[in-house]
Image: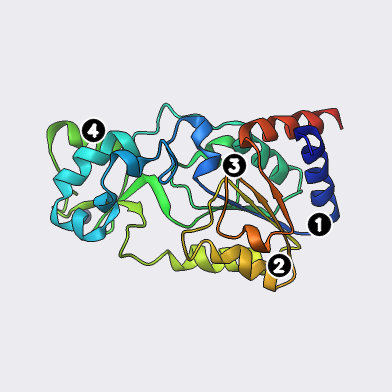
């Protein structure tokens, strides 16, 4: 099938479904200039994988911030792409229930999505590990101009509100994600290689509960073998195509 036919079929699937859940991964944001982790240009090719180990952060916060401040937390000049815009549009039209995301870039919200379940946190949010006071990326980047480590007014260490290796996923986000998955008639994954658990368990769970599973990704995923349909395509181009189809309706 060509892109045009895939786009038309995608909209038919959405029409037939009373409840559709979306799971997005790094592949959705690469077109916005945000590198994924495991791809050919991925962060793990340039950065040591321990950068996201909790122990590393706690023992060497200055080193963490030196590496991550610009690469991970400075997102002010990043803009949503066609896929973010499409998902915001579909939510507004009542065609999807919401977006579950593995991404930490906040671009779904920037595009206008309201229901966004962030499984791995948000790189633009920070909090004090001692008193819980919250800080923005703007606050923290400013502190880093004058200090190696951002410290709270109480003296506590400020940590990004992202899930590090060695930490559990936020319980409330996971619970919401499972409810969305359980109720879904159609579960669509976009731009996720579906190898990072427990996020990758959601499509399996949705399917066990009766959902149809559509996987859209450039490249193989860990769950291709259980997908009802797999679209192998460039996500931004695919999304552009659907946006223009929706515009014609
Ligand atoms: Zn504090």
Q: Is mark 4 within 8 Å of ligand 1?
A: no
- Give the labeled residue for mark 1: 17
What's the colour scheme?
Answer: rainbow
Q: Is mark 3 on a helix, strand or loop?
A: loop
Foreground mark, 3 or 2? 3
Q: Residues within 10 Å of mark 2 (few under 14, many from 20)?
A: some
Distance from label 3 to label 2 (Cα)?
A: 27 Å
Q: Residue at x 25, y 53 (%)?
A: 50
User: Picture coordinates of residue 126 (x, y %)?
Assistant: 31, 49
Residue 185 horizontal/vertical position (percent): 76, 63
Residue 100 falls in image quadrant? bottom right
Q: Label 1 vs label 4: CA separation?
A: 47 Å
Disc 2 + disc 4, Cβ < 8 Å: no
- Badge 4: residue crowd in 10 Å (few <14, some 14–19, many ≥20): few
Quadrant assignment for ligand 1: bottom left
Q: Quick one: 11 or 131, which is closer to the camera?
A: 11
Q: How far apart are marks 2 and 4 (CA)?
A: 43 Å
Q: Quadrant of the C terminus?
A: top right
**SS at circle 2:** helix
Percent across and percent down for residue 221 are 57, 54
In this view, the mark in front (2 or 4):
2
- Above or below, comparing residue 5 to residue 104 in the picture: above
Give yes or no for contact between labels 3 and 2 (Cβ–Cβ under 8 Å).
Answer: no
Identify the residue under disc 2. Answer: 183
């Amino acid at each position: 099938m060509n892109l045009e036919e895939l786009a038309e079929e995608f909209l038919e699937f959405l029409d037939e479904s009373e409840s559709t859940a979306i799971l997005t991964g790094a592949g959705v944001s690469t077109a916005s200039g945000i590198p994924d982790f495991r791809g050919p240009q991925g962060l793990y090719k340039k950065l040591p994988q321990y950068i996201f180990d909790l122990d590393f952060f706690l023992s060497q916060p200055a080193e963490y911030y030196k590496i991550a401040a610009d690469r991970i937390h400075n997102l002010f000049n990043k803009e949503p792409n066609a896929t973010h815009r499409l998902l915001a549009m579909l939510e507004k039209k009542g065609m999807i229930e919401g977006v579950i995301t593995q991404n930490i870039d906040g671009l779904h919200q920037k595009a206008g999505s309201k229901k966004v379940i962030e499984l791995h946190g948000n790189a633009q949010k920070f909090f004090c590990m001692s008193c819980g006071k919250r800080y923005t990326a703007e606050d923290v980047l400013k502190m880093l101009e004058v200090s190696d480590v951002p410290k709270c007014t109480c003296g506590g260490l400020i940590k990004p509100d992202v899930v590090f290796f060695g930490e559990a996923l936020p319980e409330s986000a996971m619970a919401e994600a499972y409810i969305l998955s359980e109720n879904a008639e159609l579960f669509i994954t976009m731009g996720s290689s579906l190898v990072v658990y427990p996020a990758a368990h959601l499509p399996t769970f949705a399917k066990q509960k009766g959902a149809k599973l559509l996987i859209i990704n450039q490249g193989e995923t860990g769950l291709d073998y259980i997908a009802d349909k797999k679209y192998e395509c460039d996500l931004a181009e695919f999304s552009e195509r659907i946006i223009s189809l929706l515009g014609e309706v």
